[in-house]
Amino acid sequence: MAQIELGNIIIEVEQKDIKNIHLSVYPPDGAVKISAPERMDLDTIRVFAISKLQWIKKQQKKFKEQQRETKREYLTKESHYFKGKRYLLKVIERNSKPEVILKHSKIELFIRPNSTLEKKQKIINEWYRSELKNSVPKLIKKWEKKIGVNSNAFKIRKMRTKWGSCNNQTKSIILNLELAKKPVECLEYIIVHELVHLLERSHNEQFVKYLNKFMPKWKFYKDELNRLPFRYLDWKY
């Protein structure tokens, strides 16, 4: 993948079978990517990037000032989030298989004595993954019917710069594990966004028309998702 450097800004350039050039700045740290038609030369892409430089800086500034979660220590009474709601963690040590139970306003983490922070984090993340795997299929089925498309599979991954992605060739969807912490409406927005890519690959006017048709409040959910605190940046992958 080619790169363009504009001062201290590095832009990744991906050329593929599309008609129009598209620029994106991704949270949490303002990574910049340009998708461009295969026939377009790199000098033309550079001129386009320069014309958007002030907008890029504005977006990066917004992400840098965005509220972030503090580093998680996985201790009792520490705040954690699930489906957009705040819960207090309760760590319970016992000599049995680790598990997580949602109980009223608490997330109970049952863990073996002397377990490391990394182990606690792994168990919590596995629980988040399991919860998403349970809820996502129903949401995909719901929106596939409304949109009139069919996907073949979905995966849950830890993603640094995207909330989701769609592979048009395999018709598979990838969702960010962090979505387990966000409101269900935001999760649905990302699912709709990726399913619409099965109708239109690019983020062009037609793509926006589809979003407006199938989910009229998509901009509200997008803004809400990007307004919520980002995860702590040292979150391991």
Image (cartoon, rainbow, N blue to C red):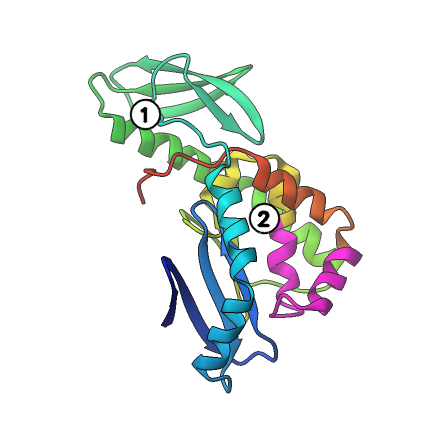
Q: Which residue is mark 2?
A: 137
Report the amino acid beneath label 2: Pro
Instruction: Tell me residue 191's x, y (percent).
Output: 61, 52
Where is residue 2 drawn, in percent x and y? 37, 73
* Crowd rating for badge 2 (residues with CA inside 10 Å; few <14, some 14–19, many 20+): few
Residue at image location 30% in from the left, 25% down from the top: 97
Q: Determine whether, in the image, residue 227 is placed left or right of residue 10.
A: right
Q: Quadrant of residue 177?
A: top left
In front here: 179 or 152? 179
Q: Which x, y percent locates residue 182?
A: 56, 35
Image height check: is 74 above or below 179? above
Residue 170 visible within the image: no
Relative to 125, 205 lies left or right: right
Q: Quadrant of the N terminus?
A: bottom left
Residue 155, given in percent of the width and then of the height, sits at 46, 53
Residue at 20% across / 18% down in the picture?
Answer: 114
Q: Which residue is mark 1?
A: 98
- Label whose residue precedes the other's in the sequence (1 or 2): 1
**Vertical arrangement, residue 172 with respect to residue 127, above or below:** below
The magenta segment is 190-213
Q: Amino acid at mark 1?
A: Pro
Compute the Cα span from label 1 to label 2.
26 Å
